[in-house]
Image (tube, rainbow, N blue to C red):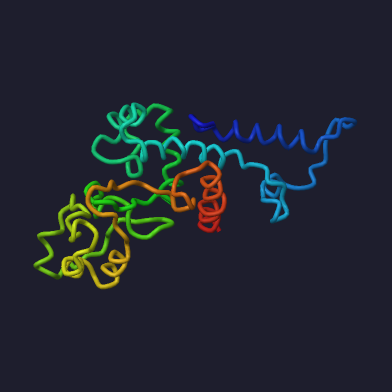
Amino acid sequence: MACFLLPKTVCKKIVSIMSEFWWKNKLESRGIYWKSWDHMCKPKANGGLGFKDIEAFNLALLGKQLWRMLSVKDSLFTRVFKSRYFAKSDPLSAGLGSGPFYAWRSIHAAQKLIQQGARVLIGSGEDTKVFQDSWIGQQPARRAQVVRWNRRDSRQYLCHNLRVREMLINQGREWNMELLTRIFPDDEARNISKIRTCGNGSKDIYIWDYNKKGYYTVKSGYWVQVNVLDRYAAVEID
């Protein structure tokens, strides 16, 4: 489950075995299922027993592999997948590609989960692309999207590969407010100006917004999948 996405039929079979083990009486051939498994998977504080949702737990485990690709970019693991699937992009925005191996299809399934909580912490801004990377706001973070298209003097800055460091001054510790207001509307410029930077010599790194320490854990990933993404999906279906 930490490496591959289990088919839904396999997940349902596992749930069936767990449910039968829980409800079945040794003296009876069949058990009485007093509560649905979805109810049993709820936290104890909400009236459930805290059992794991197998599909959500599977995605949370796969999310750890995708997080490794973001946080340890020089590892052999990351370089192998990058050369094949996201040579000119990154794991968060990469598509499946043509004829993907099942290992990549599995890791890619956790993309929405990691997109929900991953955010670039600006160091020098050298490695962060203004219009491509998720660095503004949180839960989920987003890239810069709104610009002043009607300003002629701003068009020279609207490059697809514009880096955050090009909007910083004072050795990368302060924002160039004149430039921000020239490129972005007032609200967007204000949001960007509130982001703290670490200055030149610091690296841009991804942090996880659902953990106080800033790194991804399976526990936090499972919580996001069950309490955020699955709820969104349920609302859309309704």
Q: Quadrant of residue 94?
A: top left
Q: Quick check: 143 above or below 221?
A: below
What residue do we see at 30% from left, 29% from top? 79
Q: Nearer the viewer, residue 127 or 65?
A: 127
Q: Nearer the viewer, residue 19 or 116?
A: 116
Q: Nearer the viewer, residue 63 or 10?
A: 63
Q: Quick check: 94 above or below 173?
A: above
Q: Position of residue 69 (x, y in %)?
A: 37, 36
The quadrant of the image that shows the C terminus is bottom right
The quadrant of the image that shows the N terminus is top right
Q: Position of residue 38 (x, y in %)?
A: 67, 47
What residue do we see at 37% from left, 60% from top? 137
User: 98 left or right of 155?
Assistant: right
Q: Quadrant of residue 175?
A: bottom left
Q: Position of residue 17 (x, y in %)?
A: 71, 32
What residue do we see at 37% from left, 56% from top? 141
Q: How many marks?
A: 0
Q: Position of residue 132 (x, y in %)?
A: 26, 50
Q: Quadrant of residue 95?
A: top left
What residue do we see at 83% from left, 34% from top? 30
User: 18 left or right of 65?
Assistant: right
Instruction: Check the image and name the residue furthest to the bottom.
Output: 186
User: 205 left or right of 211?
Assistant: left
